[in-house]
C-alpha cells in the first residue's frame, strides 16, 4: 500500500508575508476556499500575534473554511501561543504550530541563547500548546544548518513534550537533495519516538532546489510536505504545491506515495492566486504555466500528433487545463457561461454570476469570440475585485511622442456616496498622468514600484491584463486590472490599489477607535 504524504499548505502564511504578495481578508478567504477545494490536509492560515489583521484573518478562516486542519504559527512565547489559541477557537479541527531557531548562527546572532535555553523554550512552548490543543507541531527553524546531535536532542524533547508533528525546515534554501535525504534517514533512525509522530519538511527555493529537496525528504522518510501554491514565499519562495504533488503522482513508480489532493483544481487555484496578488504566473512555470502543455517546434508537434505521450508526461486535464474550446460570444447565455466555467474548474455562485455576466456581455460586444482565457480572467477579476469607495466612470488618455506637451489623462471617478469627481493629470507617460489625476481625486500620494502587462488571449481585440505594485502614502499594495484597452487596465489596477489603501486606512482607524 502506498504511503500517505500529508500536504501542509502555507500560501496564506509564509506565502502571503513575502513582499508583493499581501492579501486582504476577503482575498485570503477566496484563496483559502480554493485550497480547501484542492483538499490540502493542513492549511496554515497565518501568524495571529503578528498583527490585528493577521489575527482576524486566521479567525475568519477558522470560522468559514471546512475540510483542512486549520493551523496558526507562533513563536515559543506564551503570548503568541495564547493568540494562536484564540484565533483558532472556531475551527472544527485546529493545530498550533510553534517554532524556535536552532542553528548556531541563529542562536548566536538572533536569539542570543545557549543550546540549553533554546531547548527549554521549545519544551515549555510545546507543553503549553498541548494543554490547550490536541494537535501541536514543533519546527526547528534553520534545522538544516543545526548540529545533528542538538537537532536530534530538541526533536526528541518536543516529541516527549507532546508534539504530534516535528518539522525540519531548510529555512534559507541551503541544502542539496543528497544532504536532505541523508539527514532525514539519520533522524528517523536516531531520534527515540520519532516513529510515532509525523515528520515534516519545509524547503525554501533560494538555490532552486525546494521541490527536489522536499522529494528527497520524502525518500528519507518524511510524511508531510510544507509547500505553497505557485511556490510563493519568503525570498525566492517555497516548495511549489502543484509541482511536488504532481512529481509524487507522475513518478509513483519511484516514490510509492500518494496524496489526497484534487489536482484538477491546480490551474484554477494558481490563476486565482496570481490575480489576487497581482503577480503573473511565468509562461514556462511547471504544471500551471501557459507553456506547460504548449508545443511550437515542428518536431514536437509531429510527435504530439502521433501520440501525446511523446512529449507530455502528464495529462493537461489532470491539472485543470482544458484543450477544448467552447466558442462563447455575445449571444451566449448564463447556462453556457456557467457550464464552461464548471469545466474549467470554477463553481460560480449566484451572487457572483450577475457581475460576471455583465463583464462577459460587455466584452463579448467588443470581441468576435470570448476565449477560455478571457472567461477565466473575468471570473478571477470578479473574485478578486476590491470594493470601493471609488469606481472608474470615464477615462481619456492622450499620449504624445516628440511633442511639446506632456501626456495627459482625464478621468471621472464615482464615489459610493453618490458623488463624482473629474480631474486631469499630466506626466512623463500615460500611466504617470493617470497617477497624477488619481492623486487629485482621492487625496492620496501614489508611487508606482513596478508594472507588468500582458495579453490574455488571441487577436487584435484581446484583453490586456495589468499588474501593478505601488505605495499609497508610504504603504505598499498590489493591484490587478483587465480591459481590451491596456491603458485602461492600468487605470483599473491603480484604482484597485487606491481603494485597497483607503479601506485599510479606514479599518486601522476603526480598530484604534475600538
Image (tube, rainbow, N blue to C red):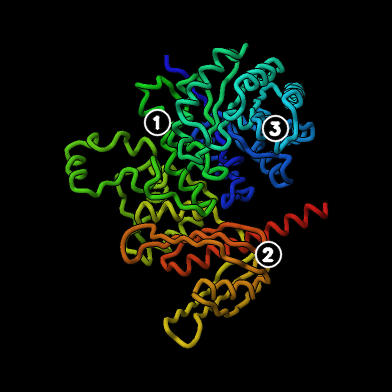
Name the foreground residue: 262 vs 453: 453
User: Horizontally, is 423 left or right of 263 in the view?
Assistant: right
Q: Which mark is residue 247?
A: 1
Q: Is residue 371 visible?
A: yes
Q: Are marks 2 and 1 in contact (CB under 8 Å)?
A: no
206 lies above or below 169 = below
Q: Are marks 1 and 3 in contact (CB under 8 Å)?
A: no
x and y percentages locating residue 331 in the rendered image: 35, 59
Q: Upstream in the sequence, badge 2 or badge 1? A: 1
Quick one: quadrant of the N terminus?
top left
Q: Quadrant of residue 116?
A: top right
Number of marks present in the image shown: 3
User: Horizontally, is 509 left or right of 282 in the view?
Assistant: right
Q: Residue at x 33, y 39 (%)?
A: 316
Q: Circle 2 sits in a helix, a strand or a loop, which is it? A: loop
Name the foreground residue: 83 vs 124: 124
Q: Which residue is mark 3?
A: 107
Q: Upstream in the sequence, badge 1 or badge 3? A: 3
Crowding near the residue tagged with mark 1, few <14, some 14–19, many ≥20 C-alpha atoms within 10 Å: some
Q: Which residue is mark 2?
A: 473
Amino acid at each position: 500500500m502506498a504511503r500517505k504524504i500529508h500536504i501542509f499548505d502555507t500560501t496564506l502564511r509564509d506565502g502571503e508575508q513575502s513582499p508583493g504578495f499581501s492579501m486582504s481578508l476577503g482575498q485570503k478567504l477566496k484563496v483559502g476556499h480554493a485550497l480547501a477545494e484542492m483538499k490540502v490536509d493542513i492549511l496554515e492560515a497565518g501568524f495571529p500575534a503578528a498583527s490585528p489583521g493577521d489575527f482576524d484573518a486566521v479567525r475568519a478562516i477558522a470560522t468559514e473554511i471546512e475540510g483542512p486542519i486549520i493551523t496558526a504559527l507562533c513563536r515559543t512565547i506564551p503570548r503568541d501561543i495564547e493568540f494562536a489559541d484564540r484565533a483558532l477557537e472556531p475551527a472544527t479541527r485546529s493545530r498550533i504550530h510553534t517554532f524556535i531557531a536552532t542553528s548556531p548562527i541563529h542562536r548566536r546572532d538572533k536569539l542570543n541563547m545557549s543550546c540549553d535555553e533554546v531547548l527549554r523554550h521549545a519544551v515549555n512552548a510545546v507543553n503549553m500548546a498541548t494543554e490547550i490543543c490536541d494537535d501541536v507541531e514543533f519546527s526547528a527553524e534553520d534545522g538544516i544548518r543545526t548540529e545533528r546531535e542538538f537537532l536530534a536532542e530538541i526533536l526528541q524533547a518536543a516529541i516527549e513534550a507532546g508534539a504530534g508533528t516535528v518539522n525540519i525546515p531548510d529555512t534559507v534554501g541551503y541544502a542539496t537533495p543528497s544532504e536532505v535525504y541523508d539527514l532525514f534517514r539519520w533522524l528517523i533512525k536516531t531520534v527515540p519516538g520519532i516513529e510515532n509522530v509525523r515528520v515534516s519538511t519545509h524547503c525554501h527555493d533560494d538555490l532552486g532546489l525546494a521541490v527536489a529537496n522536499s522529494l528527497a525528504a520524502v525518500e528519507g522518510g518524511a510524511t508531510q510536505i510544507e509547500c505553497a501554491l505557485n511556490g510563493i514565499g519568503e525570498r525566492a519562495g517555497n516548495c511549489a504545491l502543484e509541482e511536488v504533488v504532481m512529481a509524487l503522482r507522475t513518478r509513483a513508480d519511484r516514490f510509492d506515495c500518494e496524496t489526497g489532493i484534487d489536482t484538477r483544481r491546480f490551474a484554477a487555484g494558481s490563476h486565482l492566486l496570481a490575480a489576487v496578488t497581482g503577480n503573473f504566473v511565468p509562461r514556462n512555470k511547471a504544471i500551471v504555466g501557459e507553456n506547460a502543455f504548449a508545443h511550437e517546434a515542428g518536431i514536437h508537434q509531429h510527435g504530439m500528433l502521433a501520440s501525446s505521450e511523446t512529449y507530455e508526461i502528464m495529462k493537461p486535464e489532470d491539472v485543470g487545463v482544458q484543450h477544448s474550446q467552447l466558442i462563447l460570444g455575445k449571444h451566449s447565455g448564463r447556462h453556457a457561461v456557467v457550464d464552461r466555467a464548471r469545466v474549467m474548474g470554477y463553481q460560480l455562485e449566484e451572487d457572483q454570476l450577475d457581475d460576471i455576466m455583465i463583464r462577459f456581455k460587455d466584452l463579448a460586444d467588443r470581441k468576435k469570440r470570448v476565449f477560455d482565457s478571457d472567461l477565466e480572467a473575468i471570473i478571477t477579476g470578479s473574485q478578486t475585485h476590491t470594493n470601493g469607495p471609488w469606481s472608474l466612470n470615464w477615462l481619456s488618455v492622450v499620449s504624445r511622442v516628440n511633442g511639446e506637451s506632456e501626456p495627459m489623462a482625464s478621468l471621472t471617478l464615482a464615489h459610493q456616496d453618490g458623488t463624482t469627481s473629474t480631474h486631469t493629470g499630466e506626466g512623463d507617460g500615460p500611466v504617470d498622468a493617470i497617477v497624477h489625476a488619481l492623486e487629485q481625486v482621492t487625496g492620496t500620494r501614489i508611487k508606482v514600484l513596478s508594472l507588468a502587462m500582458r495579453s490574455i488571449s488571441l487577436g487584435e481585440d484581446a484583453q490586456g491584463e495589468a499588474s501593478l505594485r505601488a505605495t499609497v502614502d508610504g504603504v505598499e499594495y498590489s493591484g490587478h486590472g483587465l480591459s481590451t484597452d491596456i491603458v485602461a487596465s492600468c487605470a483599473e489596477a491603480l484604482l484597485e490599489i487606491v481603494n485597497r489603501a483607503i479601506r485599510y486606512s479606514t479599518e486601522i482607524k476603526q480598530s484604534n477607535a475600538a
